[in-house]
Each structure stands twice: as structure tokens, then as C-alpha cells.
Amino acid sequence: PALLGNAVKTAHDLLLRQAAVASPAFRQRAVLGEVEHRAWPLPDKPWLMGQTWEHLLFAHWPLRPDAVRALVPSQLSLDTFDGAAWLGVTPFIVRGLHLRGTPPIPGLSSFAEINVRTYVVADKPGIYFLSLDASSRFAVASARRSYLLPYFLAEMVARRSDATIEYRSRRTSSDGPPASFEASYGPRGDAHEASPGTLEHFLAERYCLYTLDDANRLWRAQIHHPPWPLQAAAAEIRRNTMADPHELHLKGEPILHFARHQDVVIWPLEPVDEAPAERAAV
């Protein structure tokens, strides 16, 4: 009886752990029912991947467009706001990563990540990533292969203490230039949705990314999530060399936003017809 009781308890504990890992997948699928905020319809093809992003900091700096233009493929137009190009550095934690039709795999579905991004237009407004660092070797290899993105492996620590996130990242990939980030950050104030036409809406509400293949052909991956639950944020950024490899100098205090949680689904890459951008810069 004792052995049987231990076996039952072990099985029960395993089911609880699996349920805790799988629950983000249910939330991710549920976001497909919230589409009123989108500027264009959902793709008519099946999505490929679900993720949940937690404790995300948006740190943005305005830059001269000519300083960013050379870093963006010629097939894309810079998307500007108030005459400035914008560079974002976004540390966060990935949870519940899984492919459509499969559950998140414990040990592979959660990791820390930090992105460097700017804003562009082809036929749709979107994101162009200058770099993406992650603490998961599996995630780096998979994203490089499946999404043709400039992912790099990094040593990363992300700890939550009350309402503050302690975050450190140091790139360790041998094929990438050095880059690191260290900060403490957290929310200030209540969550809200950004109003269309505002800077925070311009920076956060993006529903596709663009990338190039080795033949210099432009590809897009569409993304869907509910409107961002943004909060004002405070941050002590002690080290930030994430833009140094691109010879971009981030001066002054950044504009900060925090998001505690976002459920996301992502579609596979699709080729983009080379046509003039349909949307003028704001």
C-alpha cells in the first residue's frame, strides 16, 4: 500500500506539472477569438507556434532615420514617428513555447530572451530585428532555421523580486559580436491599452516581422495577440551594449513600458512580393 500510495502521488504530481506547463497553450489558442483591434484579418493558414511572454520591458530610444536606414533591407521602408526612427531593447521571459498540435515540452519551453528591434513597412507595418538573444540553445537553433532570424546564444538570468525584475544577459555565441544588458525594472501604475495614433501604440502594436533569406529575398511571419496590457515602467539600466554591434549610440533616457503577460501565436514565414510600401510613415 505504501508503494502504491507513493506511485499515485508521483503520478498526481506529474500531472500537475504537465498541466502547469500546458495551460499557456490553451490561453494562446484562445487569443484567436480576439481580433477587433487588428488592422488586417488573421491569416487564412494555420498558425505554427504559440508562446507566452512575461515580465517584458519595452525600452525605446529615438534615432535619426539615416542612422538606422543602412541596417534595414532595401525592400523595407523605415516606419517613423514624429520624424524619428525608433530602436527598442526588449528583455522578457518566454513560457509555454510549443508547436501547433503539440504540448510545451518541459525544459525546452521556457527561457529568457532579449531583442533589439526597429520598425518598418512593406505592404504591412511590422518589426525588423537587428538581433535576438536567448538562453536556450534549442530556441536559438530552431529560430535561425525556421524563421531566418539573427538569434544568438547568451548567458541570461531573470529573477523576480516582488514587483522588480532583475535581468542580466551576456552573449556567448562565437559567431556573434559581444553584447550585454543588465537592468532592474518593473511596472508603475495600472495596465491600459494604447490608443491608436499614440507613440506607445506605434511601438507596441505590431503584428508581423520581416527577415531576409540568403538570396536576399524578403519574408514575413505574421503574429497575433490581444492588445498589449501596457504599464508605465521604471528601470535602472546598469549596462546596455545591445546596439553597439550596429554602431548605434543610445543617448538619454529611454521611453519605458512594461507588460506582465502576453499570449501569442505565430505563423510560418511567407514570401513578400516586392512592391512599394502601401502605408506612409506616421
Image (cartoon, helix red, strand yellow):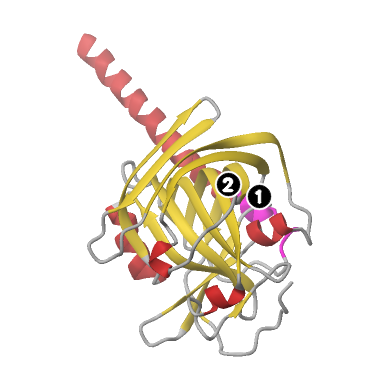
Q: In the image, what residue type sits under mark 1?
A: Trp
Which range of residues does the magenta coloring cover?
30-38
The residue sitting at 66% across, 34% down in the picture is: 188
Image check: 211 left or right of 252? left
Image check: 104 left or right of 66? left
Q: Is residue 94 above or below residue 273?
A: above
User: Crowding at label 1, few (<14), some or many (≥20) Cα neighbours within 10 Å?
Assistant: many
Image check: 172 left or right of 212? left
The residue sitting at 42% across, 69% down in the picture is: 246
Give the position of the N terminus as an image quadrant. top left
The residue sitting at 54% across, 78% down in the picture is: 69
Mark 2 or mark 1, which has the lower sequence index? 1
Q: Is residue 60 above or below residue 233?
A: below
The residue labelled by disc 1 is 228
Q: Secondary structure under badge 1?
A: loop
Alpha-carbon span between mark 2 and mark 1 = 7 Å
Q: In the image, what residue type sits under mark 2?
A: Gln
Is 34 magenta? The answer is yes
Is 206 magenta? The answer is no
